[in-house]
Structures are given as structure tokens and as C-alpha cells.
Image (cartoon, helix red, strand yellow):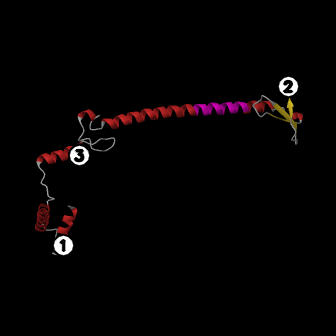
Amino acid sequence: MKQLIKDVLEDLSRGQVNLGSEAAREVVATTIMITLKEKGEYKKYTDDDLEEQEAREYWVCQICKKSSYDLDWDYIGTGTNHLSCEVRLAIDKDENTEKYQKEKERAKQLIDKSVKNLERRKLSEEIVSNNDTGYIYETPDGGKTVFRRDVGSDKRELVENWKELKKE
């Protein structure tokens, strides 16, 4: 149809039609209408057709933005929404809530692990606080085993009774 209108406008452009004129616009509209009727592309809408077009514009799902005009009432949700869109939205909401809970639990576990590591480090600092002996005390496992070495040396020795050492 678009091509037919362009062809009509092309034919009329040779005569330099002044579209500012009411008569010229009437000639253009009539020529287009006649051409469409001749080519079988012209349809005159009835009042029912126009009503249906208005209804189709109204019946649009607010979730997916697609038409819900041709659906049976059993498949219509709230307003003009598809029932399936509303169900999908509810499922997504539940899944997102579940994902949120999982992420919250994961964050709690990471915080707990971080606090335990901090407590271990604090314990290590308490053990190694006796620095005026000329030794460096090290614990690789948070205080379960304690090693000592001379300052500047790489050779370590296991401290058997580190709890007594801590009291001194």
C-alpha cells in the first residue's frame, strides 16, 4: 500500500502541487483513494471495525506489553494482563527472595569465617607478645603449635609448653 501512495505522489509531483491549498490536498486524497480502490488495497472501516481497533489498543498486558485481546477470560489476570505473565512474575519474585536468602546466608558464613580468622590472629599476637627474650615466636595454626627462632635465624624449634612461656 505504501508503494501505491508513493507512486501517486510521484505522478502528482510533476505538476508541482501546492499542498498548502485545500483544493490541492483534496485532489491528492481523492487520487490516492481511487488508486487504492483500483488495486484492491482500499478498505473502508465500519463502526464495528473502528470499535475493535480501539479495544485492541486497550487490551494490552502491562507486564509483557503484548495484546491480550484474543484471549479467553480464563487466561486474563488482573486488568488486561496475561495470567501467565502474572504467574511468571510471582515465580520470579519467589526465586529472587530465595536467592536473596541464599546470598544472605553466604555473607553470614563469610563474616563468621573472617571473625574466626581475626580471633586466630589475635591469639597469635598474644602468644608472640613476649619479644624481650631475643626470640621470634610463630604459630602457623592459630596457637595450637608454637615455634621459636633466634632473631635473624631461619632455624625454628618447637616450643613444648608455650602456655607457661606466656605466663612469664
Residue at disc 3, secondary structure: helix
The CA span between labels 1 and 2 is 107 Å
The residue carrying mark 1 is: 13
Determine the residue positioned at 85% across, 31% down. 158
Q: Amino acid at mark 1?
A: Ser
Q: Is residue 99 above or below residue 2?
A: above
Residue 158 colored in magenta in the image: no
Q: Is residue 152 above or below residue 22?
A: above
Q: What amino acid is at disc 2?
A: Asn
| Helix, strand or loop status at disc 2 | loop
Q: CA distance from mark 1 to mark 3?
A: 36 Å
Q: Are marks 1 and 3 in contact (CB under 8 Å)?
A: no
Q: Residue at x 52, y 32 (%)?
A: 102
Label 3 crowd bin: few (<14), some (14–19), many (20+), radius 10 Å:
few
Prevalent SS, magenta region? helix
In this picture, is 141 found above or below 49? Answer: above
Instruction: Residue at 30%, 38% (x, y): give it.
Output: 82
Residue 112, horizontal then vertical, whole percent: 63, 30
- Element carrying mark 1: helix
As drawn, is 88 to the left or to the right of 80? right
Crowding around mark 2 (Cα neighbors within 10 Å: few <14, some 14 to 19, many 20+) is few
Q: Could you tell whether 55 is left or right of 46 in the image?
A: right
Residue labelled with disc 3: 57
* Mark 1 and mark 2 residues within 8 Å of each other at the beta carbon: no
The residue segment tinted magenta is: 107-120
The residue where tag 2 is placed is: 161
Residue 23, image quadrant: bottom left
Name the image quarter holding the N terminus.
bottom left
